[in-house]
Image (spheres, grey):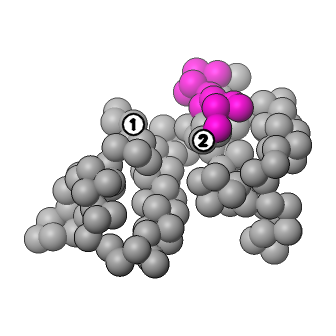
Amino acid sequence: MHNYTNSKCIYKYDDNISIVNINEFLETIPIEYRDWAKRINSAILSSINFASSGFNTTPQEILTERESICRSCDQWDAKAINGTGRCKKCGCSTWAKLRMATERCPLGKWEAVSVEDSKK
């Protein structure tokens, strides 16, 4: 299974789908759209990793811990996305990101849960 990271690659459509370096890709986008491109890239790669894991979700105990960490973080915007919250660092919906076992905090405050751990 591949684990695609936000800083290393993105799916780009030319005549087929290929993986390219995110920094090279961002150079092709007007500067005012780069933040959105990063967020879209992050969402796509998170979805690919989540699907590749068999849609493994975060166990409740770890989910509760992740939520507590995010809520106390100065990079968490509680009002964003209809009150479900957004990480200011990566732009992700924390409601979704916290529930995907394959996701990790961009600030290193919590890590992905291994497939074996998420099935317990």
Q: Main secondary structure of the magenta part?
A: loop
For marks 1 and 2, give the one nearer the viewer.
2
Indicate which disc residue 106 carries: 2
In the shown orientation, is residue 62 left or right of residue 44? right
Q: Residue 10, how many percent across, how many down?
A: 33, 55
Q: How packed is label 1: few (under 14 Cα within 10 Å), some, or many (20 or more)?
A: few
Give the amino acid type for the residue marked by disc 1 in the picture.
Asn
- Residue shown at 80% from the left, 60% from the top: 77
Question: Is residue 54 highlighted in magenta?
Answer: no
In the shown orientation, is residue 93 left or right of residue 1? right
**Whether residue 115 is situated above or below residue 76 in the rendered picture:** above
Q: Is residue 100 visible?
A: yes
Question: Is residue 109 highlighted in magenta?
Answer: yes
Q: Is residue 96 visible?
A: no
- Residue shown at 44% from the left, 76% from the top: 33
Q: Which residue is mark 1?
A: 3
Give the amino acid type for the residue marked by disc 2 in the picture.
Pro
Q: Which residues make up the magenta segment? A: 107-117
Residue 87 quadrant: bottom right
Residue 106 quadrant: top right
Cβ–Cβ under 8 Å for marks 1 and 2: no
**Whether residue 91 is situated above or below residue 111 in the rendered picture:** below
Q: Residue 28, how many percent across, how many down?
A: 26, 70
Q: Secondary structure at mark 1?
A: loop
Q: CA distance from mark 1 to mark 2?
A: 15 Å
Q: Nearer the viewer, residue 84 or 30?
A: 30
Q: Nearer the viewer, residue 47 or 36?
A: 36
Q: How packed is label 2: few (under 14 Cα within 10 Å), some, or many (20 or more)?
A: few
